[in-house]
Image (cartoon, rainbow, N blue to C red):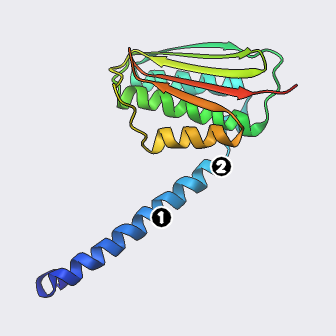
Amino acid sequence: MMIDSNPEATKSQLKIISKVVRQGMVDVRKSLNKLRPGALEKQGFKEAIEKMIEDFGSLSEVNIKLDYRLKDVDLENTTEDILFRIIQESMTNSVRHGGASQINISLYMEENNLCLYIKDNGIGCSEISYGFGLKQMKERVAIINGKVKFDGTNGFMVMVKIPIFK
């Protein structure tokens, strides 16, 4: 009824509602991101990643290869959570934005750095657009003093280095 009688007031009210809804979405995302992924609660880090890859691959028909070389590396829960989420987000982006049919994931140690390397065969991009997912990756990695780089040539690549002190 208000739209017919007072269009300007309606527009103003809709702007306020839109702002409140957006803030609510941000708050929900923050809350969800603080929760430990259930897969990591039930099993070890490697097993959780393997299960996530298996589930994702069966739903998306993407061929995903994991090269896991983290023997005798004891990771903190926060580091495991962050790496798990980055792999999850990267696989989703590879399919959703890149149309990838192949994703290669490597986890290994190089000197005193844990390295996560994710490469797909999707369309890539000439310019990296920092949407919510990529911003979250950068923020999460910064929490544990790591660095993340993205490359959109020849598919899309996510490279993470996290210092590990033994």
State whether residue 37 appears in this view.
no
- The residue carrying pointer 1 sits among few (fewer than 14), some (14 to 19) or many (20 or more) residues within 10 Å by Cα, namely few
Residue 117 visible in image: yes
- At a point 40% along the width and 23% down the height, the residue shown is 152
In the image, residue 11 sits, relative to residue 149, either above or below, namely: below
The answer to which image quadrant residue 43 occupies is: top right
Query: Badge 2: few (under 14), some or many (20 or more) residues near its Cα, within 10 Å?
Result: few
In this view, which residue lies farthest toward the front? 127
Where is residue 99? Give x, y as percent: 33, 23
Gap between marks 2 and 1 measured at Cα:
17 Å
User: Which mark lies nearer to you, 2 or 1?
Assistant: 1
For the residue marked with disc 1, what is the amino acid?
Answer: Gly
Q: Give the quadrant of the N terminus.
A: bottom left
Counting from the top left corner in percent of width and height, residue 132 is at 46, 45
Give the residue displayed 27% in from the left and 78% down from the top.
12
Residue type indicated by callout 2: Leu
Of the two numbered discs 2 and 1 on the same chain, state the one appearing first in sequence: 1
Q: Residue 117 vs residue 57: left or right?
A: right
The spot of residue 139 in percent (x, y) is 59, 43
Q: Is residue 5 above or below residue 72?
A: below
User: Farthest residue in the left direction?
Assistant: 4
| Residue matched to label 2 | 35
Tag 1 residue: 24
**Residue 82 or residue 135, whichever sits in front:** 135
Query: Which residue is at 44% across, 31% downward?
Result: 92
Question: Could you say whether the residue bearing mark 2 is in a helix, strand or loop?
Answer: loop
Dot 1 lies on which element?
Answer: helix
Marks counted in the figure total 2
